[in-house]
Amino acid sequence: RRVHGGITAKMFSSLSNRIAVDGATRFDDDEGGECSLTLRDLTGEISAEIALRIATTLQSDQISSLTELNLANNRMGDDSVRHISTAIQNSHFSLTKLSLHCNRISADGARDIAAAMQRHRTLTKLYLGNNLINNEGARYIALAIQSGECALKELYLNDNRIGDEGAGHVATAIQRLCSLTLLYLNGNLIGDEGACHIANAVQSGECSLTTLYLGYNHIGDIGARQMGFAIQSTNCPLIMLDLSRNRISPRGAHHIANAIQNNRLRLQKVDLRHNYLPNSIVQVMTQAMERRKSFHLIAAKEHFRVEELGEFLSAAGDCGWAEVVQTVLNRIVTLQNGRRILKLKTYHM
């Protein structure tokens, strides 16, 4: 598809704001079919004035075949997002994919996007990562998901300062027969309480999620335990679960290990990298993986900082000290010129 001036819409990346807006004033739609518009990584930022001009263009009768709109990485802010959201609600096209990550969107902007989600029933993919949505914004998005007017299948809310309260709102939404199958919540502030909310939701029998990303949060052993119970439930639809870079100790990992030994488990992939997993737990998981040929475990930790040693030992719980120390040493030993070189600094307990 092409916009006025002979510039292809899919190659509309990295242009100045002035050129972008002038170039997007008219779509040539004489060839029929679908088209996508990308206005991302622009020089400067999309101000409210420029966003209003883009919004006016989007509401034109001439634009009827737009299916993908990419406005990521433009530092738009809430005022600009409000104009874009209004345009989407009043548009003549059937948008299926909307990208708004990295745009300084707060809870106010999330409220406007939520309104667009409910009015635009063809939208199936929404990218809102790396914004400032927080718990309140998560509530607006969650209400839109469970409204019955939303057909969203993939939602990206990573890196948005969402905590346990926001996770609770999302959990309520995904257990009310919504259409969501993929949910990104990586890089937020979700702890055990939020993880428990989500664990209860995925085993409710009314959740359709198959892919769940909860990496780089603050989930500990309590959350891991509840998630372990959840994935063993016959009602749990999860196929892929990411719990990497959390605060799961051997005690919490034990519950996940027990869960994946269940041969009736639907789960096919679990990511536990950058947690505190002793060799015995990894071995149990590996054996379960060997029995279930379709199961994929990611548990290796590429880097283990010496300053993490105290936290690891504190979290070791009931594991034997010999095993704990050996696990630590195994992770600090590196290969250099074909020889095993031990790099270990003194840590004062």
Image: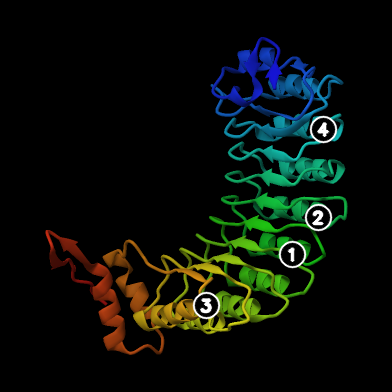
Query: Taking 142 as reference, is 228 left or right?
Result: left
Mark 4 burial class by Cα count in 10 Å: few <14, some 14-19, many 20+:
many
* Residue type, numbered disc 1: Ser
Q: Nearer the viewer, mark 3 or mark 1?
A: 3
**N-term-proximal mark, 4 vs 2:** 4
Give the SS element for disc 1: loop
Q: Nearer the viewer, residue 322 or 91?
A: 91
* 258 or 307, nearer to the observer: 258
Q: Which residue is mark 2?
A: 143
In terms of secondary structure, where does tag 2 sit? helix
Closer to the chain start, of discs 3 and 1, is 1
Q: Amino acid at mark 4?
A: Thr
Residue at 31% x, 82% y is 324
Q: Nearer the viewer, mark 4 or mark 3?
A: 3
Query: Which residue corresponds to mark 3?
Result: 292
The residue indicated by pointer 4 is 86
